[in-house]
Image (cartoon, rainbow, N blue to C red):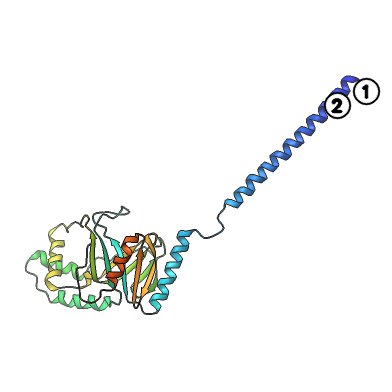
Amino acid sequence: MKFNDLYKSILLREFDAEAETLGRDENNTQNDVSQSTIKEEPTTTPEPEKKENGLVEQLKQALSKGASFASFLYRAKGTAKGDQEPNGAVGIYNLNLNVDYKRVKAEDRAKIEAYQPTNPVEVQAKEEMLNPRPYANKDVFEQLGKGIRLNVKNGKIHIFGWPQKYELIKAGTPKAEPKGEVPRAKKEITKKLGLKANKIRDFILDPTHVAGLKVKGNTIMFQPDEPEMVAKVDDVANTKGGETTEGEE
């Protein structure tokens, strides 16, 4: 073999060896990246979902054992619309969950039917109160027990009942008064007849703002994520009986 041919042969062998080494290094790097990616994928349930599921199970258990009151910190919607952050008053409620809404509605209806309007506006107001527009709720709910249900779409908790105690913590922007003659007439008739169905409220709690639950006797206390408010919720929870101000919507 001539010298030039020998030299070329050696260079080719060295090039092939280097290329093979680079190929192995590249494969190892890809494998390392792949393995690293696999390790970073979550293998357990995210904490917010864990917390929500735990809260739901606790509520089911408490309600199955006869809990009939709920105490919680709540910010009223105020003038906020849609998904806007609520800007109403902040207060603590003690709610009676053991409410027969159908019976209350029937009693209210009897009072409205017997009412004699004093002017054409009240005639229309009475007609609308007796035949309200149907409300199409597209949400899907799981009933956890008397007065409490879960919105399975967004995970929020709905608490339905009659406020027994309300303590204002911080004032906010109040909800606007109804506009128009007929809505105002409805409000006046409701007040005049002492109707009660409108006092039964549906509160919506975001579980991400609930630190935990505490059950004492027949009362469920939603512990707020603000530590300084926990004791206040407990105090309001221990006060029952006697109808008080219902707070703001």
Q: How many marks?
A: 2
Q: Residue at x 28, y 55 (%)?
A: 86
In the picture, the disc for residue 1 is 1
Q: Are marks 1 and 2 in contact (CB under 8 Å)?
A: yes
Which label was assigned to residue 9?
A: 2
Q: Amino acid at mark 2?
A: Ser
- Which of the 4 image quadrants contains residue 8? top right
Determine whether the residue tagged by mark 1 lies in a helix, strand or loop. Answer: loop
Picture quarter with the C terminus: bottom left
Q: Is residue 84 left or right of residue 18?
A: left
Can residue 136 be seen here? no
Q: Is residue 19 above or below residue 193?
A: above
Q: Residue at x 38, y 71 (%)?
A: 214
Q: Which mark is residue 160?
A: none
Residue appearing at x 39%, y 68% in the figure: 213
Amino acid of disc 1? Met
Q: Position of residue 138 (x, y in %)?
A: 36, 63
Does residue 75 show up?
Answer: yes
64 sits to left or right of 88? right
Mark 2: which secondary structure? helix
* Along the line of sight, the residue nearer the viewer: 22 or 192: 22
